[in-house]
Amino acid sequence: MALKPLGESIREYDKVVVTTCSNMCEAACGMLVYVKDGKVVDIYGDPEHPLSKGALCPKGSGAFQHIYNPLRVKYPMVRKSLNDEFKRASWDAALDFAAERLMKVKKEYGAEALMLHRTGRSDFLWKLGGSRFGKIWGTPNIVGQGPICCESPGVAMNYTYGAKDLGRLMNPTTDWVNSKCIMIAGSNTAANHPVEMLWVLDAKERGTKIIWIDPRFNPSMAKADIAMRLRPNTDAALVMAMINVILKENLYNKEFVDKWVHGLDEWRPLIEKMPPERAEKITWVPKETIIQAARMFATNTPASVSGCLGTAQTYNSNNINRCYGILVALTGSIGVTGGGWNWLHNCRPPLNYGKDLASLPPVKAPVWLGRCLCGEFSQCNIYTKALSNKGSMVEWKYDGADAIYTEICSSIQEEC
Ligand code: SF4
């Protein structure tokens, strides 16, 4: 058998389906799915795809395991209590069962007893449809992991750029090759976003300067012109010191700043209090490196910053991300090709909630009742747990709260 060209499956197949990877992240890499007798036998990256250019991450390459995994749930499974085994059910029976239980909860405890949860992995219809369902149902409790994840950069950008609903003002990955300088913070892109890393490497080959910021030495840093390993959570001091240098040496884009930037004069006194010497003590990054990075970023424009979970899931995330956003603005790299405050994590852009969230029923403040309804104060596990974690173990003040609490208590009666 002759060797097949690179990029083609070595397995026997009778057709190739051109498609995209879906719902494991939002990159939507191009895929060639090799099929034999109606079964997927292999998946390769599509070299014709403009974003992924033939690359797939391991999740994409292994995507066919989703289809044939014996544990995959392919039809409704119902169990009527936690002690029962799951049994296969028809869609009608499963929907009736869910509706009946939901109506019971609503009747006994009120509409707000229902909480809907979505994540960055939820598909768009669930993100949008979830809030619509909550509105129709009458609960404001539509939640996600956003507040401890990527919402802070989105909110930071809303504050900084006044760009409500635009979130992180992403320049597309395919545009990164047009940056003269890319600064990446809080990401090991080669491992976590291999497809995007291709574009970083492509940009570097074209002469783009790369600045990398991360507390760890990560392998992606090997490609950086300047790598800054900072003390965790000190990005704000680092970036303020870079801005200090840029302002002091007049390296900012005066024309852009005069036209578009508000509040710089009010911020200057604070920036003056963060020279590189002081930032070195806070961040542990040598002051010479901070100065060098500031000059490199400001004199190689358009420049862009790409943040990731390292700048989101961190203490002081909101202000850290505002600093990065301001740095980009001072170089005039907003709204231009090759610029932008970009984002590597895949909850982007933040379309998560849709406009329905704005018109959800009002949220009622949680109220700490501080009492145990089963009456066994001294031995009651739930009461003890609640006391030791006051503030997270709360009740909603509405008709039916007592009923829920009683039910929780009685459900762990054996423990009480
Ligand atoms: S990066 Fe991986 S998971 Fe995301 S679309 Fe591409 S192949 Fe799929």
Image (cartoon, grey):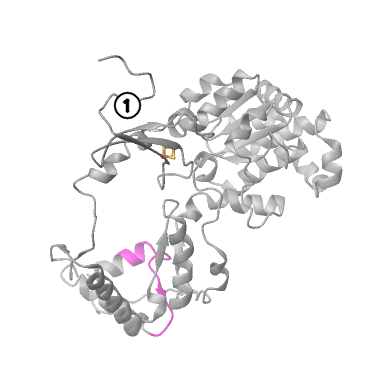
Q: Would residue 290 be counted in the magenta stretch?
A: no
Identify whether 38 is placed above or below 204: below
Q: Which quarter of the rendered image does ligand 1 occupy?
A: top left
Q: Secondary structure at mark 1?
A: loop
Tell me the quarter of the image containing the C terminus.
bottom left
* Left or right, 247 with reference to 380: right
* Residue count near mark 1 (Cα–Cα under 10 Å), binned few <14, some 14–19, many ≥20: some
Residue at 25% x, 67% y is 381
- On-image quarter of the N terminus: top left
Along the horizontal axis of the image, is 75 left or right of 251?
A: left
The disc labelled 1 sits on which kind of residue?
A: Ser
Residue 208 placement: quadrant:
top right
- Residues 103 and 39: in front is 39
In this rendered view, identify the residue nearer to me: 188 or 54: 54
Percent across and percent down for residue 13 are 27, 31
Q: Relative to residue 273, is residue 366 depicted above or below?
A: below
- What range is drawn magenta here? 385-399
| 49 displayed left or right of 182 | left
Residue 249 appears in the rendering? yes
At horizontal 86% and vertical 38% (from top left) the residue drawn is 255
Compared with 73, 39 (above or below) is above
Q: Is residue 330 left or right of residue 87?
A: right
Snapshot quadrant of residue 297: top right
Residue located at (15% from left, 70% from top): 414
- How far from the left and from the top, in percent, is residue 310? 51, 39
Q: Which residue is mark 1?
A: 9
Image position, residue 346 (x, y; %): 49, 44
